[in-house]
Amino acid sequence: MQSLPQADSLSAGKQVVHLWLGDKGTDPGARAAFDGDGGVKGQVAPLLDPYSLEVRQFSVSNSNTLYRIYVGPIESLEKAQELCAEIKKHGVDKCQPVIN
């Protein structure tokens, strides 16, 4: 069985900053929470327009799967922190800068 690549190998050893905007139980649910009717993107437009959506699948300890909503890559950790502060002003509760 082939092992999954580590985060560093996915980003060529560079620190890549994204915003974590929450998670849902399905991939379509995560995508809709971002760009569907009433989604985060619409709530904070045009703040996130320059960035790409990335939905990542995660297995959690109770054998469930979550689909995490990320946006990026962001130019720097400082820029990500500024974006989260602005996003939260628009009523979005979940926004956290993450590296890799």
Image (tube, rainbow, N blue to C red):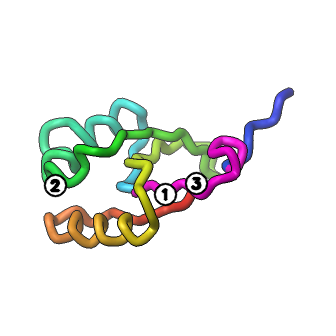
The foreground one among 69 and 28 is: 69
Q: Earlier in the sequence, mark 1 or mark 3?
A: 1
Q: Which residue is mark 2?
A: 44
Instruction: Tell me the number on the disc at residue 17.
Output: 1
Task: Please tell me which residue lies in front, 54 or 28.
Answer: 54
Up/down of 86 relative to 16, above or below:
below
| Local SS, label 1 | strand
Spatial separation of the CA atoms under disc 2 and disc 1: 19 Å
Element assignment for label 3? loop
Mark 3 and 2 residues: CB-CB less than 8 Å, in contact? Answer: no
Horizontal side of 27 relative to 57 (left or right) equals: left
Q: Amino acid at mark 2?
A: Val
Q: Position of residue 48 (x, y in %)?
A: 25, 50
Question: Left or right: 73 with respect to 29?
Answer: right
In the image, 67 versus 83, the foreground residue is 83
Q: Which mark is residue 100?
A: 3
Please tell me whether mark 2 sits on a helix, a strand or a loop: helix
Quadrant the N terminus occupies? top right
Per the rendered image, the range of residues in magenta is 8-19
Q: Position of residue 99 (x, y in %)?
A: 55, 60
Q: Amino acid at mark 1?
A: Val
Cβ atoms under marks 1 and 3 closer than 8 Å: no
- Residue at (60% x, 50% y) in the render: 60
